[in-house]
Image (tube, rainbow, N blue to C red):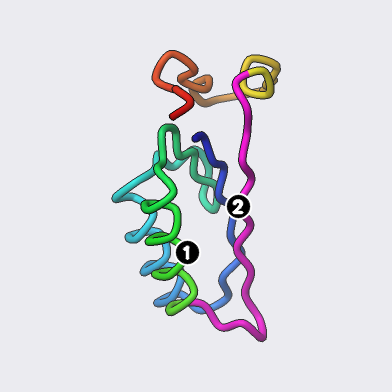
């Protein structure tokens, strides 16, 4: 499944750890936004567990958006950056 994961983490060290955890599974498209094409449910749970252990629940937030193929095909952007890699996306 394709996920878009966004976060707002106030502490620099925690933010670095969140980025490091996400880079193992996802592609960074903006400073706090990662695209994760083809995540399995287990991988998503692993990411969630890792991030839950890192963030401060009183000040930080992480959002997980599940996107369908049609949503990805309808994505628009402005400025720099690559488009979404829909070819790699598959429903399992």
- Does 17 appear above or below 25? below
Q: Residue at x 63, y 57 (%)?
A: 63
**Image x and y of residue 47, in percent:** 41, 60
Q: Secondary structure at mark 1?
A: helix
In the displayed structure, does residue 88 sit left or right of residue 9?
Answer: left
Gap between marks 1 and 2 measured at Cα? 9 Å
Label 1 belongs to which residue? 48
Mark 1 or 2 closer to N-term? Answer: 1
The 10 Å Cα crowd at callout 1, few under 14, some 14 to 19, many 20 or more, is some
In the displayed structure, does residue 9 sit left or right of residue 40?
Answer: right
- Does 41 appear above or below 37? below
Q: Residue at x 51, y 50 (%)?
A: 31
**Image x and y of residue 26, in percent:** 39, 43
State which region is magenta: 55-69
- Label drawn at residue 32: none
Q: Secondary structure at mark 2?
A: strand
- In front: 56, or 42? 42
- Label drawn at residue 64: 2
């Amino acid at each position: 499944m394709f996920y878009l994961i966004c976060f707002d983490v106030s502490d620099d060290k925690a933010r670095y750890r969140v980025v490091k955890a996400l880079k193992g599974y996802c592609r960074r498209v903006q400073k706090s936004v990662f695209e994760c094409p083809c995540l399995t449910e287990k991988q998503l749970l692993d990411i969630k567990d890792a991030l839950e252990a890192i963030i401060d629940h009183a000040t930080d937030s992480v959002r997980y958006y599940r996107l369908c193929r049609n949503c990805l095909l309808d994505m628009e952007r402005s400025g720099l950056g690559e488009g979404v890699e829909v070819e790699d996306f598959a429903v399992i």
